[in-house]
Amino acid sequence: MKVVTDEGEIECSAVILVSDLEASPPEDGTMPLSVLSGGHTPKGTVVLDLRGGPHRGGRARALRAIERILDDGGRAIVLVDEVLAYGRDELLYRQVQQAGALFIRPRAVEWDGRRMEVIDDLTGATVSMVPDAVISESATSERQACRGTVGMGPLTTVRPGVLMVRADLLDDELTTEARAAATIALRPATERARPAEVDQDRCLACLTCVRICPFGAASMDAEGKASIDGDLCRSCGKCVAACAGRAIVLPGSTDQELEARITAAMEGG
């Protein structure tokens, strides 16, 4: 297969595409999340408004920037649609909360460009502040993206060998999903997919894999540990990417295994 880029044609055996996210302009009186890029951190009291967006990867980078603000002696208030999370998201939220950030799910927000008043939806209490910076990103619109192979239903791609991975992932999850996509793309048609495997000693019993598996392959066994039904698993890698305990692996997705697949595909084997 040939892929045409700005630098010319590239010979490859499989293509993995990552969809982009287009952010709407921020509301008046706020700064976009891009101000947090490159290590820049506003000083003083910072309000980070994550309601309605951005995608999870952008949210994770924003929360890590909040940690830097707190380390510099600043104060951080994070406005979110939902204060509950699971999997790796939960670990990140907990880490930022422990660092001193105040998370609020607002019932109402009043902001006149100088003073902000937020009504906490859980307690009804009003939080009043004069922030030094308000960082907000409006809801994002994502171009349609999917990933899969023939026979995977809604995850099926149109062209064999071209698989699409959602950009709505954390950075390490994106790497894991890309590896899973490559494992699927490079597997010979005559070879059966190898299901995900669980290291039960590392399983945290958080139920993340059960919640997100699109094929219902994940469940909890009699000991309260995760288990993968090999007959239902389609090797999509979603549970591998989201597992907070790094307890789930996808056979065939290591560097050495993928390099061997690529070599065999390029040689026509």
Image: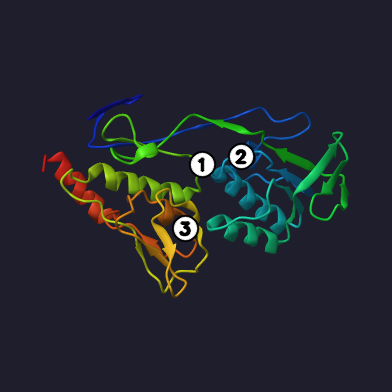
Q: Secondary structure at mark 3?
A: helix
Q: How many residues crowd mark 1 within 10 Å: few (<14), some (14–19), many (20+)?
A: some
Q: Which mark is residue 54?
A: 2
Quadrant in the rendering for residue 254: bottom left
Q: Which residue is mark 1?
A: 168
Q: Amino acid at mark 3?
A: Val
Q: CA distance from mark 2 to mark 1?
A: 9 Å
Q: Which mark is residue 157?
A: none
Q: Disc 1, disc 3: CB below 8 Å?
A: no
Q: Amino acid at mark 2?
A: Pro
Residue 46 placement (x, y as % from top left): 76, 47
Q: Residue at x 41, y 36 (%)?
A: 146
Q: Residue at x 45, y 39 (%)?
A: 166
Q: Residue at x 84, y 34 (%)?
A: 113
Q: Disc 2, disc 1: CB below 8 Å?
A: no
Q: Secondary structure at mark 1?
A: loop
Q: How many residues crowd mark 3 within 10 Å: few (<14), some (14–19), many (20+)?
A: some
Q: Secondary structure at mark 2?
A: loop
Q: Earlier in the sequence, mark 2 or mark 3?
A: 2
Q: Earlier in the sequence, mark 2 or mark 1?
A: 2
Q: Which residue is mark 3?
A: 210
Residue 60 placement (x, y as % from top left): 58, 49
Q: Amino acid at mark 1?
A: Asp
* Quarter of the figure that contains the N terminus: top left
Residue 96 placement (x, y as % from top left): 66, 58
